[in-house]
Image: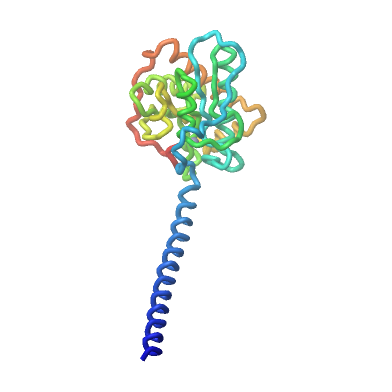
Amino acid sequence: MIRYRQKQKRRKTMAIAVFLFLIFAAAGISFLISSRNSQIIATADTTEPDNPDTLPKGSVTEEAPTKTEIVCLDPGHGGKDAGAVYKNITESELNLKVALQVRDMLEADGYKVYMSRSDDSFVYKRPRARYCNSINASIMVAIHHNSYNTDHNVNYSTALYNKDIDKALAASVLNAVSEKLNTRNQGIATFDDSLLYIATMPAMLSEATFITSSAEYQQIIQKNSPRITAEAQGIATGIENYFADQTASADITSTDSLIIDRPD
Ligand SMILES: [Zn+2]
């Protein structure tokens, strides 16, 4: 009787052990699946810690400024985040090339210019805007390029904004860029993006050209590309026009839907 009870007890213990094992195994498998999924989602720079301590190191011009306005330039993507890619050109490197020239042009004109990154380092999106807030920038200009791999003839200039105070800056930069590059001016469009709404000052995101455009590609790959310099001149001019007269640019809000691969 005692032995029978012990046997019964042992069977019960075994059943509980098997039951627990199955639960842990199921939990383990579902964890593996979910972590694999989150790795797929995390290929873009969308998943990031919401931590103000992770402000980028950034950089600032050394010349003593003669102008009072402070510009914060944000070359999009960088490091493990290449942004859009076409052939051997990554958006992250093109954005940086343009931004470094914009910085030099504005510095030569007497502006103090900060950059969220001035090399190929990876920076999360929210800290970029927080960085521009932390240095009391007058404006933030994010530099990106569009992509549309379905048709390599697609090419136009646009600018993205979020807040009402962004619109005049976005329009001013877009108008100057489009004029300088002789690209179709597609108008400015709203963009619900953390970078733009965390920035407390007028902020905009420039999409001067399509990195996937065959015609642009031929010009971008040239040594000391005049096309890249022209784009930088357009952005710098748009910024200075904005500082000169913030009401000068007409409302050029886009009514067409944009043809793009990705919103940033
Ligand atoms: Zn981008």
In this rendered view, identify the residue nearer to me: 7 or 146: 7
User: Compared to 10, does 170 lie above or below?
Assistant: above
- Residue lying at the far bottom in this picture: please name it: 1
- Residue sitting farthest toward the front: 2
Task: Name the quarter where the C terminus is drawn.
Answer: top left
Measuring from the top left, give residue 24's x and y in whole percent. 43, 67
Apparent side of residue 154 relative to residue 190 in the rendered image (left or right): right
Name the image quarter holding residue 138.
top left
Q: Residue at x 47, y 17 (%)?
A: 239
In percent of the image, x 43 and y 62: which residue is there?
Answer: 30
Front-most of 79 and 94?
79
Which x, y percent locates residue 174?
A: 44, 23
* x, y percent for residue 137: 47, 19
Q: How is the image coloured?
A: rainbow
Q: How many marks?
A: 0
Q: On the rendered image, what quadrant is the N terminus found in? A: bottom left
Q: Where, by quadrant of the figure, is residue 16 drawn?
A: bottom left
Residue at 40%, 86% (x, y): give it: 7
Question: Hey, which residue is sitting farthest top in the picture?
Answer: 66
**Taking 129 as reference, is 180 above or below it?**
above
Most foreground residue, 63 or 19: 19
Q: Residue furthest right?
A: 223
As displayed, is residue 41 above or below residue 55?
below
